[in-house]
Image (spheres, grey):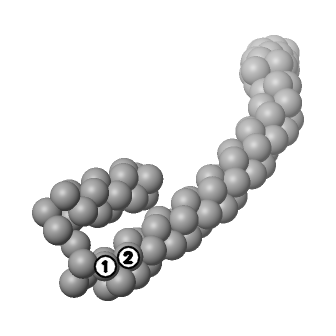
Amino acid sequence: MLRTELAEIRGKSARVQRDYDDLESDHSQCPYWIQRNESLAMTLDDRCQKLAKENERLQTMCDELTSEIRRLRAQNFDEVDNTDDVDLRALRMLALLECW
């Protein structure tokens, strides 16, 4: 009876040890992947910050162009003939394209 119990316990112990070894080998790369993912996240965060700065720069440029168009329109409103109006529309469209 004790021998049977001892054999069962040894069998369970061997299974637990195998399971532990399997888990250890399966997860031995976890620190590598954690570090890699953290590094990738930092790289992506840096890129997002650069893109946000570039977006702000382009938005400022777009706002400046829009203001310049308004200024030109106000300055030339009375003097504009059809041809000049077409030129101003083209300039405005160019500014809008720059904003995109």
Number of dots carrying numbers:
2
Q: Nearer the viewer, residue 6 or 33?
A: 33
- Badge 2 amino acid: Leu
* Residue 48 against residue 76 in the figure, above or below: above
Asked if the residue under mark 1 is in contact with the one under mark 2, i.e. CB atoms within 8 Å, the reply is yes
Q: Nearer the viewer, residue 71 or 10?
A: 71
Residue drawn at (44%, 53%), measured in percent from left and top?
Answer: 98
Question: Does dot 2 land on a helix, a strand or a loop?
Answer: helix
- Badge 1 amino acid: Asn
Residue drawn at (32%, 85%), measured in percent from left and top?
Answer: 74
Residue drawn at (17%, 68%), measured in percent from left and top?
Answer: 81
Choose mark 2 or mark 1, whichever is in front: 1
Question: Does dot 1 land on a helix, a strand or a loop?
Answer: helix
Q: Quadrant of residue 37?
A: top right
* In this picture, residue 95 sits left or right of residue 14: left
Q: Where the N terminus falls, by quadrant? A: top right
Q: Residue furthest left?
A: 82
Q: Horizontal and vertical percent for residue 44?
A: 69, 45
Work out how far the residue at label 2 is from the one at label 1, CA to CA, in angstroms. 6 Å
Residue drawn at (80%, 34%), measured in percent from left and top?
Answer: 36
Residue linked to disc 1: 76
Q: Nearer the viewer, residue 61 or 2?
A: 61
Residue 72's tag is 2
